[in-house]
């Protein structure tokens, strides 16, 4: 499968500069796309008969495959769920957040706190088994995700997502992220997964 870098739908955002976004998208995310393709090519050629749990080329490639692939998927979700200046939270989304967190405000408080606590990612996900929303902290691309959960809103809190614009001021970056959420895109993801109140 040939992987391609998905283009950004903006050049800058409220509080996130063009330089910050280009470094993040055109270098880091594009690198994950390239590396995922390389791993997939090597897996096709790896000696599966030598696979073992201590060390084998096949085993190492399989472990790194999830890190690289989730690096692609999480970045694509992150860039897709932002738009310059953001837009209003749709009633349907607000109702679902209130149902599962008590109110939109309680959800936002937890999501922001998760952003301060996480080492890598915060994801608002829909647990398809429990039929509820939850905020999940992922300290690495392939650690912290919950099986059978759809990612609805993704926030990257690795330093590379904000260091050019904010240095170590993560809280200010999270404020900027919230000013740029494309809630229409988030709602479209709710529709795609048939999530109902």
Image (cartoon, helix red, strand yellow):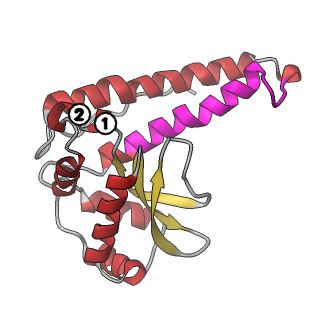
Within-10-Å neighbours for mark 2: few <14, some 14–19, many 20+: some
Q: Is residue 83 above or below residue 130?
A: above
Q: Is residue 6 above or below residue 14?
A: above
Q: Is residue 73 magenta?
A: yes
Say whether marks 1 and 2 touch (CB < 8 Å).
yes
Within-10-Å neighbours for mark 1: few <14, some 14–19, many 20+: some
Residue that appears at 48% across and 49% down: 138
Say what secondary structure mark 2 lies in.
helix
Disc 1 from disc 2: Cα separation: 5 Å
Judge by depth and name the residue closer to the eye, 155 or 158: 158
Q: Which residue is mark 1?
A: 159
Residue that appears at 46% across and 68% down: 134
| Apparent side of residue 197 relative to residue 155 in the rendered image (left or right) | right
Say what secondary structure mark 1 lies in.
helix
| Apparent side of residue 82 relative to residue 176 in the rendered image (left or right) | right
Q: Position of residue 108 (x, y in %)?
A: 28, 68
**Dominant secondary structure, magenta:** helix
Q: Position of residue 71 (x, y in %)?
A: 47, 36
Which stretch did the figure color magenta?
Answer: 51-76
Residue that appears at 60% across and 60% down: 148
Q: Position of residue 54 (x, y in %)?
A: 80, 27
Judge by depth and name the residue closer to the eye, 177 or 139: 139
Q: Quadrant of the C terminus?
A: bottom left
| Apparent side of residue 58 relative to residue 32 in the rendered image (left or right) | right
Q: Which residue is mark 2?
A: 163
Q: Is residue 179 above or below residue 94?
A: above
Judge by depth and name the residue closer to the eye, 80 or 15: 15
């Amino acid at each position: 499968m040939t992987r391609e870098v998905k283009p950004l739908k903006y050049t800058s955002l409220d509080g996130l500069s063009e330089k910050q976004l280009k470094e993040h998208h055109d270098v880091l995310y594009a690198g994950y796309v390239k590396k995922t393709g390389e791993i997939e090519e090597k897996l096709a050629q790896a000696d599966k008969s030598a696979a073992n749990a201590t060390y084998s080329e096949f085993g190492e490639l399989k472990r790194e495959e999830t890190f690289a692939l989730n690096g692609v998927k999480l970045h694509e979700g992150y860039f897709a769920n932002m738009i310059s200046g953001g837009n209003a939270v749709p009633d349907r989304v607000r109702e679902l957040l209130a149902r599962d967190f008590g109110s939109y405000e309680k959800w936002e408080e937890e999501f922001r706190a998760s952003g301060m606590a996480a080492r890598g990612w915060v994801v608002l996900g829909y647990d398809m088994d429990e039929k509820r929303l939850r905020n999940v902290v992922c300290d690495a691309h392939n650690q912290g995700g919950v099986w059978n959960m759809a990612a609805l809103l993704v926030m990257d809190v690795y330093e590379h997502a904000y260091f050019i614009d904010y240095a170590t001021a993560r809280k200010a970056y999270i404020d900027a992220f919230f000013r740029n959420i494309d809630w229409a895109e988030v709602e479209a993801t709710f529709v795609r997964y048939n999530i109902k109140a």
